[in-house]
Amino acid sequence: MPSSNAGVWPLRLLLFKLMFMSGVVKIQANCPTWLQFTALEYHFATQCLPGPFAWNAHQLNPTFLRCSVFATLLIEIVLPFLLLLPFRDMRIIGAKLQIVLQVLIILTGNYNFFNLLTIILCLPAMEYDAFSRVQFKYSRICRFLVVSFDLLVPTTYLFISVLITLPANSYFHLHFLVRI
C-alpha cells in the first residue's frame, strides 16, 4: 500500500532537518573535540545522566571512539539526504542507520524520550511494506501517527494562537487555562 505523501513527506523532512542540524551544529560550534573527532573520549565520562553502557563505552580504544565520532557525523550530516531520495530502498537504509544511532545513544546516555521520538520519526521513511515480512502492524501505526500529526499540529497552532491573542488579564483566558 503506497504511503500518503501529504502526511509522510512532512515527517521525513522533519527527520531530515532534525538529524542534519544535529550534525551541522557540532561543526559550526568550532568545538575542537568534534573537529578533531575526540568528543566521545570525554562525552561518556562527562554526560549528566549516563546510560547503562556509558562506562564500558568510555573504556573503548580512542581510535575506535574517533571512528565513532566520524560515523556519528556521517550519519547526522550526510546520510539524512537518503531520507529524501525517491528510492524506497535508500530511504529505508537511511532510516535504519538513524535508528541504529539513536539506539546506541539510548544505551550510552539518557536524553529522556528524545531518542524514542526520533525513532518514531524514522518510521514514515521505512514505507508500509518494509515490515511485511515480519507481519508487523506498521500500516495501522503509521496511519495513526500520520493522522495524529495532521490533526495535532494545526490544533496546537490554533490553541496557541488563541492564547496569544487574548489579553493576559482576561477572565476567559484565566478560566480557560485553569480548566486545562
Image: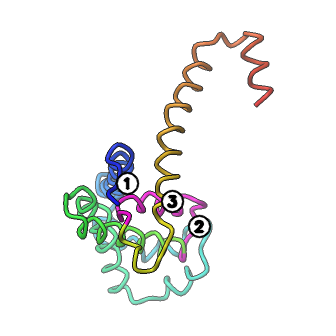
* Above or below, comparing residue 47 to residue 27 in the picture: below
For marks 2 and 1 on the same chain, the one whose residue lies earlier in the sequence: 1
Marks 2 and 1: CB-CB under 8 Å?
no
Is 149 included in the stretch rendered in magenta? no
Q: Check disc 1 and report the residue beneath it.
A: 15
Residue 54 placement, left or right of 99: right
Residue 41 placement, left or right of 74: right
- Give, as a three-letter code, the residue at label 2: Asn
- Give, as a three-letter code, the residue at label 3: Arg
Residue in the picture at 56% in, 32% down: 156
Q: Nearer the viewer, residue 68 or 154?
A: 154
Residue in the picture at 54% in, 25% down: 158
Q: Check disc 2 and report the residue beneath it.
A: 110
SS of the residue under disc 2 = loop
Give the quarter of the image for residue 163: top right
Dominant secondary-structure state across the stretch colored magenta:
helix
- Give, as a three-letter code, the residue at label 1: Leu
Q: Nearer the viewer, mark 3 or mark 1?
A: 3
Residue 148 placement, left or right of 125: right
Q: Position of residue 99 (x, y in %)?
A: 42, 70
Q: Check disc 3 and report the residue beneath it.
A: 140
Q: Which residues are magenta?
A: 107-128
For marks 3 and 1 on the same chain, the one whose residue lies earlier in the sequence: 1
Residue in the picture at 39% in, 70% down: 39
- Distance, label 2 to label 3, CA atoms, is 29 Å
Q: Nearer the viewer, residue 60 or 9?
A: 9
SS of the residue under disc 1 = helix
Q: Position of residue 76 (x, y in %)?
A: 32, 63
Give the quarter of the image for residue 168: top right
